[in-house]
Amino acid sequence: MERSLQLAIIIGSTREGRFGPRVTRWFATMARDHGRFDVDLIDLAYTEWQAKPVAFASYGGLAGGLRAVEQLRQVFAEVHATTVRDVVSLHNPWTLFDEDARAHEPTGSEAAAKTLLDRLAWWAGALRAARDSVPYAA
């Protein structure tokens, strides 16, 4: 017996009166009935994203995953999340780490990670204080 495959289905529409959940429920049923998938539904209209900070660590070829990050920034703006400007971007990372996931030359990547985490912590604290004092309404 083969192990189940993990399938995440994203409801991308966040509009009032949207039709997406109906289509998604149908497709999720089809995927479950197929028998090979464990299905996880992700609804971008869940309020857990609202007024929360999002940071990105990307990797890839020459662009280091930055094109994907720029697309994701637009997605998170639509769900009322705040993206941190700073990003960790690793270009051609396949030779940058040892078997224990330690960077061979950590200076640049660790500095970028520290900056990203410092900014993420600032935004998380600021947005938490704001949500505590005034509830966020999208």
Image (cartoon, rainbow, N blue to C red):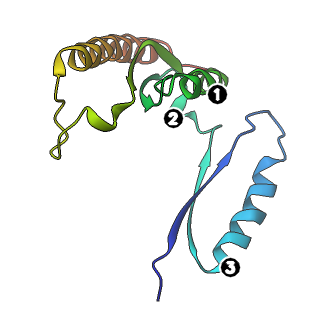
Residue in the image at 64% along x and 27% along y: 75
Rendered-image quadrant of the C terminus? top right
- Residue 34's quadrant in the figure? bottom right
Per the image, the residue denoted by label 3 is 33
Per the image, the residue denoted by label 2 is 48
State which mark lies toward you, 2 or 1.
1
Which residue type carries mark 3?
Answer: Asp
Per the image, the residue denoted by label 1 is 75
Q: Is residue 53 left or right of residue 32?
A: left
Residue in the image at 47% along x and 83% along y: 2
In what element is the residue under mark 2? helix
Q: Nearer the viewer, residue 125 or 70?
A: 70
Alpha carbon of mark 2 to alpha carbon of mark 3: how far?
29 Å
The mark nearer the N terminus, 2 or 1, is: 2
Vertical relation: 40 (above or below) 63: below
Image position, residue 13 (x, y; %)? 75, 38
The mark nearer the N terminus, 3 or 1, is: 3
Image position, residue 22 (x, y; %)? 80, 56
